[in-house]
Image (tube, grey):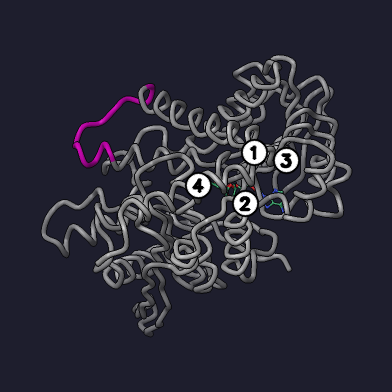
Amino acid sequence: MAKQIVDVNVTGIPSVITAGALDEDLWSAVLAQLDEVARHIDLDPGIHAILRHPERELTVAVPVEMDDGHIEVFTGYRVQHSSARGPCKGGIRYHPDVSLNEVRGLAALMTWKCALVDIPYGGAKGAVRCDPAHMSERELNRLTRRYTTGILPILGPKRDIPAPDVNTNAQIMAWMADTASMLEGQAMLEIVTGKPPSLGGSLGRRQATGRGLAIVTREVLKRQGRSLEDTTVAVQGYGNVGATVAALLHAMGARVVAVSDVSGGLYAPQGLDVPAIDEHVARHPRHLLEGYRAPGVETLTNEELLTAPVAVLIPAALEQQVHAGNAADVQAGIIVEGANSPVTPEADRLLAERGPVVVPDILANAGGVVVSYLEWVQDLQSFYWDEEEINAKLETLLVRALNDVWTVSQGEGVPLRLAAYMLAVRRVADAIRTRGIFP
Ligand code: NAD
């Protein structure tokens, strides 16, 4: 069943988007995946057992005085899956249906993602069960501050560093940083990332995930001896991630022929004028593609976009878009996962039999966490880089990760997704083995 995901924009005014069903028991799925990877890499059973258990879990009651004076008690979580490779890192999600098992699964995925891009972090995730679409900015402010106070004993720049996730944003990170600073009696801005640049946030953070996708797409094409200039691209989702990757690939010379959002899609075999579309979206009251008209541009549905005749497909909207029912019709030779889990495991198997290269989410959309890491480094050293330097460092880290995954994939004859997980789990296991078991 479709779920409502509420996007709170920077001004705190919620707008609602509809998403496909989130995984009901993500934790079971993550454990099954770990078990499969463990078999492939012959993982030590003791280390396997450690990785099947989150290191630390905290559930907190979050009482909030609502604007009408009544008190509501929300439930908040922070799960630290692993700190083997460094302080835990992971976002905070506000959602009415979030569960502890979902947070556990998301925390473990952060452990793998940070290890894969080889940044010195473990993995964590946090959440509050709440419906931000029905809360005022003042209520969200109070909720955030009380939740932060509840989980503060296990946070810290060298312990656990939260970031934005679904329905949280730079403003919420600013409130978290302020709450920690007030309670500790000292500046603690480096306790969260994804902050506004005026409060120690990094330049380039907003575009980081889309930029990472564009870099990864260019590198995969390069490995296939192809150039961006001869490449057609379809992008599903025209929000932060989708619009950024479409704009960058267009600027890099690729032919972006199809884009879509919740209002539908646009298709032009000769290539879309992406800057003109951006102007339209900026002017649209709800920042949608609907209503855009230009010569040679047709409309298409989201389903049609997924199976359009293109070289590269970038699903950057929702989970589970390519599934057993449409995988056989996907014509793209390269699928770069912008959203998390846009390809179901069953579709993944069907695609693997047919041959398209699937660049997994854990690698393709890691640009955000890489720039979060760069933000933390800048905060710790209290010295800030310009955007050019940040983009260059992002590129270095992502290209290195792609090279590493490619080498494992070729060397062991496995698809990129399995290669990415094998590499990530091996790195975490190495850290555990090298540190030894305390005491
Ligand atoms: P966003 O809210 O800015 O944009 C989402 C886009 O998806 C919008 O264009 C929306 O219209 C579209 N959409 C919503 N429902 C749709 C539907 N039913 N059919 C087609 N399109 C639909 O979100 P975002 O930050 O761009 O994130 C997009 C995806 O990437 C999400 O799955 C998110 O979890 C994932 N992701 C984001 C980041 C990040 O840094 N923003 C990092 C990693 C992964």
Q: Where are the magenta residues, as a range?
A: 377-388
The residue located at (37%, 50%) in the rendering is 431
Give the secondary structure at mark 3.
strand
Instruction: Residue under label 1, please give it.
Output: 412
Query: Mark 1: which amino acid?
Result: Glu
Taking the image as shown, residue 439 lies to the left or right of residue 33, namely left
Lower sequence index among marks 3 and 2: 2
Asked whether disc 2 touches disc 4, contact meaning CB atoms under 8 Å apart, the reply is no
The alpha-carbon separation of the residues under discs 1 and 2 comes to 10 Å
Asked whether disc 1 touches disc 2, contact meaning CB atoms under 8 Å apart, the reply is yes
Lower sequence index among marks 3 and 4: 3
The alpha-carbon separation of the residues under discs 3 and 2 comes to 38 Å
Instruction: Residue under label 2, please give it.
Output: 40
Q: Decide: is 133 above or below 336.
A: below
Instruction: Residue under label 4, please give it.
Output: 424
Q: Which mark is residue 260?
A: 3
The alpha-carbon separation of the residues under discs 3 and 1 comes to 36 Å
Q: Residues within 10 Å of mark 2 (few under 14, many from 20)?
A: some
User: Would the CB of label 1 be found within 8 Å of ligand 1?
Assistant: no
The residue located at (24%, 41%) in the rendering is 379
Front residue of this view, candidates 18 and 219: 219
Disc 3 versus disc 2: nearer the observer: 2
The alpha-carbon separation of the residues under discs 4 and 1 comes to 15 Å
